[in-house]
Amino acid sequence: MLDYGFKEEHTMIRELVRKIAVEKVMPVRAELDEKEQFPWEILKVLAEADLCGLYIPEEYGGFGQSVLAFCIATEELSRVCGGVGVTFAASALGSTPILIFGTEEQKRKYMPEIAAGKKLAAFGLTEANAGSDASGLETTAVKDGDYYILNGTKQWITNGGEAEIYSVIAMTDKKKGARGATAFIIEKGTPGFDFGKKEKKMGIRCSATRELVFQNCKVHKDQILGKEGMGFIVAMKTLDLTRPGIGAQAVGIAQGALDEAIKYAKERVQFGKPIISIQAVQHMLANMATQIEASRALVYSVAKAIDNGAKDYTKEASMAKLIASDTAMFVTTEAVQIMGGYGYMREYPVEKMMRDAKITQIYEGTNQIQRNQIGLSLIKESARK
Amino acid sequence: MDIIVCIKQVPDTTEVKINPETNTLIREGVPSIINPFDENAIEEALRLREKHGGKVTVITMGPPQAKEALKQAIAMGADDVALVSDKAFAGSDTWATSYTLAQTIKKIGRFDIIFCGKQAIDGDTAQVGPGIAEWLNIPQITFAVKVELQGDKIKVERLLEEANEVVEVPLPCMLTVVKQINEPRVSSLKGMMKAKKTEIKTFSAADVDADPLKTGHNGSPTRVVKIFTPPPKGGGEMLCGSTEEMVSSLISRLKERKTI
Ligand SMILES: Cc1cc2nc3c(=O)[nH]c(=O)nc-3n(C[C@H](O)[C@H](O)[C@H](O)COP(=O)(O)OP(=O)(O)OC[C@H]3O[C@@H](n4cnc5c(N)ncnc54)[C@H](O)[C@@H]3O)c2cc1C
Ligand SMILES: Cc1cc2nc3c(=O)[nH]c(=O)nc-3n(C[C@H](O)[C@H](O)[C@H](O)COP(=O)(O)OP(=O)(O)OC[C@H]3O[C@@H](n4cnc5c(N)ncnc54)[C@H](O)[C@@H]3O)c2cc1C
């Protein structure tokens, strides 16, 4: 990997996470995948190593609010297991709304425990009839004195059931359209808040994906994030900030697959020589490595820009997620190809990597939606000239 | 509760290779690590501190590069560390090593428990811990697999070959630990940052009032005459054929070699 001129602490974070990933995650990743088992043991190790608050300011118990640091950690975890990577990253997704829109009180109440890894967070936007088109939300929050009464079901919520703290978007006034949604912090255990079915997935199978079910769930108005009506803004600003993290996850999965493909190509002998000496194979590896480095460079650049205080990074955050996730799908598919029939077998890790890679093109906005976003930004930018 | 942990920096391999001409370890290209059992010792000390409060001090005798091992100990959570390093210590055997460490511990002063690893993966003698206990004239318990503090006494389960043995001794005492006692934690980020900033203090022979006749090569009664890698065992041979054929083939081979 290129020397990106990191600070020493970033190198330290990478080494520490790499060590944890290799020593604690690698030996169990196949089993976690097979059993669809949530990786609590690993989260405990990450918490003890102070890695759960990389994106959280020190005053709230974190390590200094660095998107770059968070991306590096997510990348190294995902390099070994995409499922563990997303479990780690989804807690950041779930708590980012509190970080950027929370009141001082809300931040003091929730962030330290999340930073310490004592509690996980989750983000609830998607519903059965509202995926790419969030305006289709049907979950409602009806004002009742100092409270709001929530009804509806959120679908495919990462860390659902396992997390303690949920950022949930619900419609407070359907008539107001885009200004009719509101974001709430809802704690597990709130009466009327339950969990529905746990999904069986193609990949990232140790990650929990579950329904959040609200039935006359009463939430105090102090749990609102921002103001009533700001729900979609909360969601969009949050996703802008976390998309580089999905990019990092994708870069990690791709790198893990390339590592395996190279190792295998050096060992596998056909026609009397290791297949890595075949130029066609070298070219495949060259394309894989080139795309990974390009993706990584963009992910890091966007993360660094955000850390340096950039204001408008929606387009670039989308680009980072787009190129990295397409790369992950391309690279993992090629890795299976290089490993031939062995690559297709569950005994080897690349078939899992290929299954894990696919989700990065779908969640936090499909890649079509990312292209829409980039296109829209281009139009806006050209209009400004 | 004041706990001292003795750690040794060793080459990162369980298969130490030896240069047959010079009889010395081949260290080139082999990264150094904390002796694995000593990581268990640090972990157990940290757990006792977490439960009962107190202070964990980690010490090592070795060359200046052994500071890296101490930094890792800080990253894991040690409160204080010290390197004992002096040209005069070169060539120490287990007698001189345990003397020097005991002197250092006396210098540090307060301690309730001293933890060591069961043995070092390079030297492998398992003598240093017990040696320290003898120099300090305190009780020792080796092969600890479970430790329970009970006031000013400690109850320890020892992992033996046939059975486990439970013993109890008054504090202060010296314990050596086996790897089954716990799973060492990984370093924490805050610990690593602290380690980076920490200036490691070094004790010289004079600092620990070491008697020059008891340290280093001079103070070491042991002379390592020869260290060698045993020649690899030859591969076995499978005999084939019917039972009769195999038996007669075996007998003729044994006769050939004058075994029978
Ligand atoms: C494993 C997993 C975990 C998830 N975790 C979470 C979570 O934690 N929180 C959460 O809120 N959500 C989560 N989601 C939901 C995820 O964000 C959505 O699945 C995603 O946004 C797409 O929505 P959809 O699946 O309904 O697809 P649809 O919106 O139905 O899209 C179907 C297809 O149509 C295309 N399409 C739709 N509209 C357009 C358009 N305008 N232009 C071009 N193409 C279009 C899409 O790209 C896609 O290919 C998760 C999903 C999965 C599978
Ligand atoms: C291959 C080889 C063979 C050797 N053979 C002999 C021999 O037969 N007789 C002999 O007297 N010496 C021998 N030595 C020298 C011996 O290694 C050193 O004296 C060494 O300092 C201590 O012995 P050990 O490595 O066997 O440690 P052990 O006694 O096996 O170590 C037990 C524990 O003592 C503590 N400890 C050991 N060394 C240190 C240290 N430097 N600083 C802090 N804590 C420590 C650790 O907690 C460790 O887990 C040999 C060395 C090598 C490399």
Image: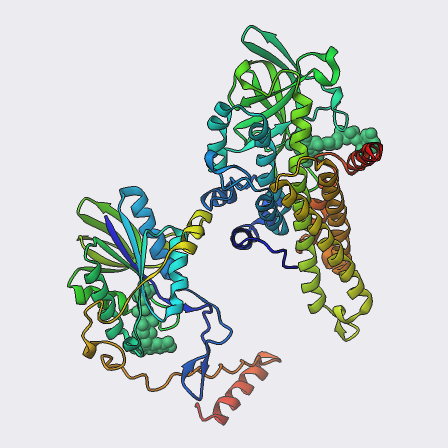
Q: Is residue A271 left or right of residue B102?
A: right
**How was this image coloured?**
rainbow
Q: Residue at x 31, y 79 (%)?
A: B91
| Along the line of sight, the residue nearer the viewer: A212 or B235 | A212
Is residue B118 in view?
no
Quadrant observed for ligand 1 in the rendered image: top right
Query: Please, is residue A303 above or below residue B198 in the view?
Result: above
- Viewer-closest of B255 and B116: B116
Residue A179 placed where, x, y %? 71, 17
Name the residue: 29% across, 84% down: B223
Determine whether B2 is above or below B68 in the image. Answer: above
**Quadrant that contains the C terminus of chain B:** bottom left
- Image coords of residue A275 (percent x, y): 76, 69
- The outermost residue toward the top is A145
Q: In x, y percent, where is residue B241? A: 62, 80
Residue A316, quarter of the rendered image: top right
Q: What residue is at 27 percent from the left and 43 percent from the top?
A: B53
| Rendered location of residue A324, percent (x, y) | 73, 47
Q: Residue at x 32, y 83 (%)?
A: B224
Q: Nearer the viewer, residue B171 or A146?
A: A146
